[in-house]
Image: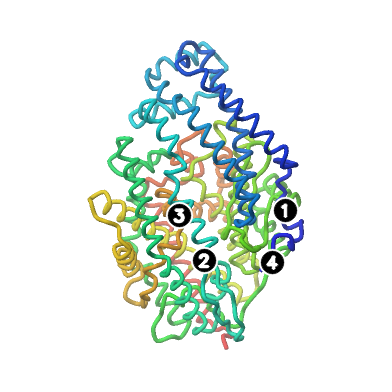
Amino acid sequence: MKNRDQINDKYKLNIKDLFETEESFFKEIENLYKEIDKIKSYEGKILDNSNNLFELLSLSENIEKSVEKVFVFAHLTNDFDLEDKTGNEYFGYAYKLYQEMGVASAYIIPELLESDYEVVKKFIEENDKLKKYERLLKEIYRSKNHILGKSEELILSKLSEVISYPESAYSKLVDVDLKFDSVLNAKGETIELNESSYKILMESQDRNVRKNTFETFYEGYKNIINTTSELLAANVKKDNEMANLRKYNTALEAALDNNDVDIKVYKTLLNAIEENLDIIYRQWDIRKESLGVDELHLYDLSVPIIKNYEKKYSYEEASELIKEALEVLGEYYSDVLKKAFNENWIDVFPNKNKRSGAYCTCVYKTHPYVLTNYNERYDDVATLAHELGHAMHYYYALENNNYCDYNYTIFVAEVASQVNEALLAFHILNTSSNKEEKICILDELIRHFKSSVIRQTMFAEFEEIIHDKEQNGEILTKENLCNTYYDLNKKYFGNNIVVDDKIKYEWSRVPHFYYNFYVYQYSTGYIAALKIARDIFDKKEGALEKYLRFLSLGATKSPVESLKVAGVDLTDKSVFQEAFLEFNREMDEFEALYKGGVNNE
């Protein structure tokens, strides 16, 4: 794998629009400490008059904008090379600054909540400048019953770095320290096994390569299972204790309330999957028949169905394909998308010690920043489209909202990304005349439904179960965690597939288990995205306009209400049933094309 300095600059993120030099980065931090100190001067005086409240909120907003800029710069610099001393130091300084701001401002919400919202409401009526912060203030008072007193909030702020230790330790463990044995590819070449090469090798047409890769990969996670078990158990206990401190019944309730999402959405998702397990199992029968194997194993689920069809997409080809597929979203959307490709908004290729996976982040009134590890497969094209969906959602939100209203909640974050992926697939299916390519895309859609809806819902159920176990006094040992995860695999995959024993270590591979009930949103996001993308692609009247309005909302509406603007009501069970009908249609089309005959020698 190449070192960072061996990658052409045109494929690297330009973060100099944040800070040109190291000197300017540290100068900003120095100035911010002085500004943060000013926050303390308002303690005990916030509600003396409307002007005090406005001054404090304005000061906090300006500081937060700058802290966001410092944090994103440091985070990206660190992620480019996780072993680089400079990036590590930048991130350490940025995190300390972030923590200091949290400590300095810890009194604000408790002090506000010492009075009723009626006091603040009168301030807003008499001082027009406070109108800008009305939604933010309403949101604070919505959570009044779950905010602690000044001293307690201050203590929690000071402990924030310690509280986040399980997640940070896990990241270092799996991204830097975890090493796997090498494996052989189909050509007999020795391959260094990591997250990126694992995905490629699991698509090998050589079943022995897949099996060996699967077993070697999870043997690596087995070797660190004692440590990952301790880290996840500590994180679950932290979630439960924090929920209890804030007077929630469960950590799940706390996590959903934080995003203003009704727990009914979570339960409806799990129930919908439960009721449609037969449809889920159908894909294994199709895959078993297509691959011509006596029994289907978990290591058979990623291999493309068409044996000799392997299309590589250069980054330039992927860029053009994505731009073509997303033209349906309108001229303005397309123009901004071109800027993302032309103005170094994307960090494209993997390099040694670069953070694995892909993500998008943003700084207000600059532009989004996308990090990927591109390897020229269709999956990488789809991932790129996915992250650009996040980028465009950020862009629309920050262009149309004040700073305090632009940053939409996690619950809607996966919608725009999944819309882009679906539109990419629909575009190829509609324009390609190659039967093999169509079968591959349909196979990808089926596998994507599995990974984004079924697998993420399984993750969500795992999270709920282990949090409940810990809350009820069970000790989350490695055996408890592994057995719980293995049993869920048996449930979600059914009897028509061999659930290989080593899959029980897979939970230790999932960083999202440290994000406090994040993963279910991939499922709800994809279900919402399927409907939105299908309606736009089919040119349903008003569908595009509704979607663009949704992208522009930021945090101005609750997440569930935001999706209603886009035409999706996730409190309605029929939305979930509609998604499974679409899934069934994809399997029908796949079977019809495949049984129509392909060259699969």
Q: Residue at x 63, y 42 (%)?
A: 395
Where, quadrant-wise, is the N terminus in this rendering?
bottom right
**Of the numbered discs in the image, which one, if any, rests on residue 341?**
1
Residue matched to label 3: 512
Contact, CB < 8 Å: mark 1 with mark 4? no
Q: Are marks 2 and 4 in contact (CB under 8 Å)?
A: no
Report whether residue 524 is seen: no
Question: Nearer the viewer's eye, disc 3 or disc 4?
Answer: 4
**Front label number (2 vs 3):** 3
- Residue 488 rendering spot, x and y as whole percentages: 32, 65
Q: Nearer the viewer, mark 2 or mark 4?
A: 4
Relative vertical location of residue 197 with respect to residue 41 in this rendering, above or below? below
Residue position marked by numbered label 4 in the rendering:
2
Say which mark, if any, is on residue 445: 2
Q: Quadrant of residue 384?
A: bottom right
Using the rendered view, name the quadrant where residue 39 is placed: top right
